[in-house]
Amino acid sequence: MSTQPRRTRVSDNILVAFAQTVWAGVWTALKGLRVTGYNSFFRPRVTVCYPFEKLEVSPRVRGRHRQLLDAQGAPICIACGACARICPDACISVTRKRVAVTTPEGEEKQVNRPEAFVIDLARCMYCNLCAEVCPVDCLHLTADYAYSTGDIRDLTAGLDVLTRPEPVSEYELKSRVAG
């Protein structure tokens, strides 16, 4: 006795059964193509040709991190480390140094500035807690969401990346250099 189930044919004639099986397959394919064809030709397109066309994003979107600069071009960050302490992914590391700054009144003053400020963008979940906790509001998340790389080590943002004057993606940078 065999344990495999018997395949039942629709008809006892093998040619009729073959034709019925082929017709069932063709009919199934035509039903699927009917749906695909209707959606392709009679409905408006919802996709864009990215990166050449980009969709309008919400102003609340949270993308790449940026640090604000003062009038002299130095980061406003006081290197307090609040952003690193509140980060749930522990992807921010801040080391500080003391620098002498001349105030507008002309007096010399020692302040904290970041010596190294690194965010691991591969680990970041873009929750915006780091920007909300910042006491001097120097860190914020821009709407720049389009950045990718083939190497995960390139997804670390130091002070040089965080203080760029405009939020541009790596694709835009490469196209500016090429063009």
Image (tube, rainbow, N blue to C red):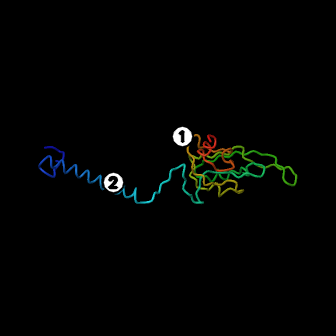
Q: CA distance from mark 2 to mark 1?
A: 36 Å
Q: Which residue is mark 2?
A: 33
Q: Which residue is mark 1?
A: 150
> Which x, y percent locates residue 100?
82, 46
Secondary structure, mark 2, is: helix
Pick the quarter of the image with the N terminus.
Answer: top left
> Which x, y percent locates residue 31?
30, 56
Tell me how many marks there are.
2
**Mark 2 neighbour density, 10 Å: few (under 14) some (14–19) many (20 or more):** few
Secondary structure, mark 1, is: loop
Amino acid type, mark 2: Leu
Asked if residue 132 lies left or right of residue 28, the reply is right
Pick the quarter of the image with the C terminus.
Answer: top right
Of residues 63 and 42, the one nearer the viewer is 42
Of residues 119 and 44, the one nearer the viewer is 44
Asked if residue 36 lies left or right of residue 23, the reply is right
Amino acid type, mark 1: Gly
Q: Are marks 2 and 1 in contact (CB under 8 Å)?
A: no
Asked if residue 70 lies left or right of residue 14, the reply is right
Q: Earlier in the sequence, mark 2 or mark 1?
A: 2
Which residue corresponds to the image point at 76% horizontal and 52% vertical from the top-left?
Answer: 70
Which residue corresponds to the image point at 52% horizontal and 50% vertical from the top-left?
Answer: 50
Q: Is residue 138 above or below residue 178?
A: below
Q: Residue furthest left?
A: 12
> Which x, y percent locates residue 146?
57, 49
